[in-house]
Amino acid sequence: MRPADVHSRPEDPASDETAEGGATLAEIARAAGVSAPTVSKVLNGRADVAAATRTRVEELLRRHGYRRRRGASQQSRMIDLVFHELESSWAMEVIRGVENVAREEGLSLVLSESAGRLMPGQTWVDGVLARRPAGVILVLSDLDAAQRAQLTSRDIPFVVVDPAGDPGDDVPSVGATNWQGGLAATRHLLELGHRRIGVIGGPSRMMCSRARIDGYRSALESAGVAADPELVREGDFHHEAGHAAGLELLRLPEPPTAVFTGNDLQALGLYEAARELGVRIPEDLSVVGFDDLPLARWVGPPLTTVRQPLTEMAEAAARLVLDLGRGRRPAASRIDLATSLVVRNSTAPPAA
Amino acid sequence: MRPADVHSRPEDPASDETAEGGATLAEIARAAGVSAPTVSKVLNGRADVAAATRTRVEELLRRHGYRRRRGASQQSRMIDLVFHELESSWAMEVIRGVENVAREEGLSLVLSESAGRLMPGQTWVDGVLARRPAGVILVLSDLDAAQRAQLTSRDIPFVVVDPAGDPGDDVPSVGATNWQGGLAATRHLLELGHRRIGVIGGPSRMMCSRARIDGYRSALESAGVAADPELVREGDFHHEAGHAAGLELLRLPEPPTAVFTGNDLQALGLYEAARELGVRIPEDLSVVGFDDLPLARWVGPPLTTVRQPLTEMAEAAARLVLDLGRGRRPAASRIDLATSLVVRNSTAPPAA
């Protein structure tokens, strides 16, 4: 496979860039009172257009539903992957999935981090408009309406992996069966005989975290076990939060005998809290994580966890976004891959 | 910061692309019996040149030491990062370092994996020639002489992080003080009173691994402790190798009381072997890792390890490659950042 030429793009917009049904580029230019090449510059994310002009042109593009049709020759051979934070082997699993597909397709992978914000900044969007990637994959991240409109008008498809918020029905996304995972984790603990089961969730603004906790609640409810609100803690998916919430739970007058920790990193934080307090896993405390990162197998004791197929999710997202770029519409705008419980040594029946 | 325009590059080569001292592009074209635009196409990694012509032109470029001078406007706003394998949080620490600098500089990060080979393939090189990044960073990876010549003739600078082999004096590289790290790890164990100290190295073809083991040997020697060849094992820096070598070492008639594991993942493999055999850490066995990945703090017991400043190394490499692109020559072609021993709970005096 050979990378396509990235610099033979036509600067002249008239020839093969036309609106789908809506206004043509020339009409947008007339309405904005600028030349067609100026509209083309805005479409290409060029810096040499006055800010006010850009704003006016963007507004007209949006209002007229302008959509550039791109042939394959006008796309660069790149795929954009954006994380809200580049951290932990969680991100590595996702990167590997996208890289697998990128290599198969002879595409380069452009990686960005929105620096902890759930929305990438405008600088990033400008870069995407200039790069014209074959597609954009956002991880635990989202675009605002104006950014979406900008990508759409340039015919740059995007897919969200594990959407943090609710991306809306029109945004294709790939996730995992988080609710079922929370249900399976909690059922496993119930079947072992636990009744006092705590949970440390991720941030409540993240849908994946809410779904896992709802699964936990449903499992308790269908087993006829009352959920004790004192046993429900909110974390942020990092080790430190698992440690802090773990100490709180284990220091309760009546501590839980088992905890579903929302993800693997929080499970390790709980491991540390248990070590500090001399609480043995699994003899005194059962722990179930979520994700099944490689380290879940390596920690002591090896962690029982809900496997989330991160690499496969990323591969699915990459294939989906490339399909969209080729004009194929997906059967469903949301794909959820199955989670599965992996039982290792951190769970056991409660002490008698 | 605004990304520069990536598609306004001059296709006409005559204007501002000249050789440094050597032949001009027109002379290369004449010698090859092709037109100047054809040489330009080869320089740009374009697909539409016959293979034989490409080979002839590349050969002439190399022989004449042709070097294109690029202005900033002719570079794309990208930086290329290549791993020999994208795995573990080790790679994530490096990615984060390069991403930090890329963000500061308004550059996009293009990530590739050479799929376990220590040399990226020609497809990758062709992609780089077409992309024209501001610089290339290779991690545990290297280029062959022809690939180096190709990048040099296009004025695309490159830097190697933690070179696997010996990249040669003319290749700028960033590493860590591996020998000192191996020395410090082993001295720590000697000071605790251990005399029977094993080591599990990485692959012997990797210089960083050799240096760590040599540091181990030097520490033993200067303490007057004879190195027992039976206690020296070769791994591959993965968890499984640490597990396998760990089982071998712990099953020796006279097993070591302490092991320096070459990296953190191998330490976790040894943890698992010790668990399986009922060997307690640190009571029966002291363990020292290398890297100080985030998980070193999280495992039980928290791992004593040699910190390798991976993120800082990656930042240094990114700054170095951008400096080279701006025509600044580095003071030294090899920068080694300091390692430091981090003592946690996996090391203790040997049982009496």
Image (cartoon, coloured by chain):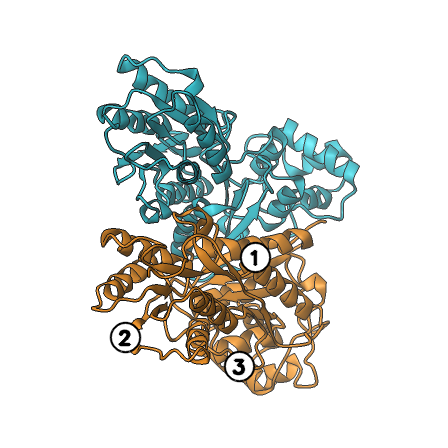
Chain colours: A orange, B cyan
The residue at 57%/45% (across/down) is B113
Residue type at mark 1: give it: Thr
- Of callouts 1 and 3, the N-terminal one: 3
State the separation of the CA atoms marked 2 and 3.
Answer: 33 Å
Compared with residue B52, is residue A300 higher up or lower down, i.e. above or below? below
Compared with residue A2, is residue A312 higher up or lower down, i.e. above or below? below
Whether residue A254 is visible: yes
- Of callouts 2 and 3, the N-terminal one: 3
Residue type at mark 2: give it: Glu
Quadrant containing the C terminus of chain A is: bottom left
Query: How far from the left and from the top, in percent, is residue B153?
Result: 59, 36
The residue at 78%/35% (across/down) is B33
What residue did someone put label 3 on?
A: A168
State the separation of the CA atoms marked 1 and 3.
Answer: 24 Å
Query: How far from the left and from the top, in percent, is residue B80?
Result: 52, 47
- Chain letter of disc 1? A
Q: What element carries label 2?
A: helix
- Chain letter of disc 3? A
Q: Residue furthest front?
A: A352
- Of callouts 1 and 2, the N-terminal one: 2
- Chain letter of disc 2? A
Instruction: Say few, some or many: other residues with alpha carbon within 10 Å of mark 3 (under 14 / 14 to 19 / 20 or more).
Output: few
State the separation of the CA atoms marked 1 and 2.
Answer: 35 Å
What residue did someone put label 1 on?
A: A311
Compared with residue A223, is residue B7 higher up or lower down, i.e. above or below? above
Which numbered mark, 1 or 3, is in the foreground of this view? Answer: 1
Q: Is mark 1 on a helix, strand or loop?
A: helix
What residue did someone put label 2 on?
A: A230
Image position of B276 (left or right of A241): right
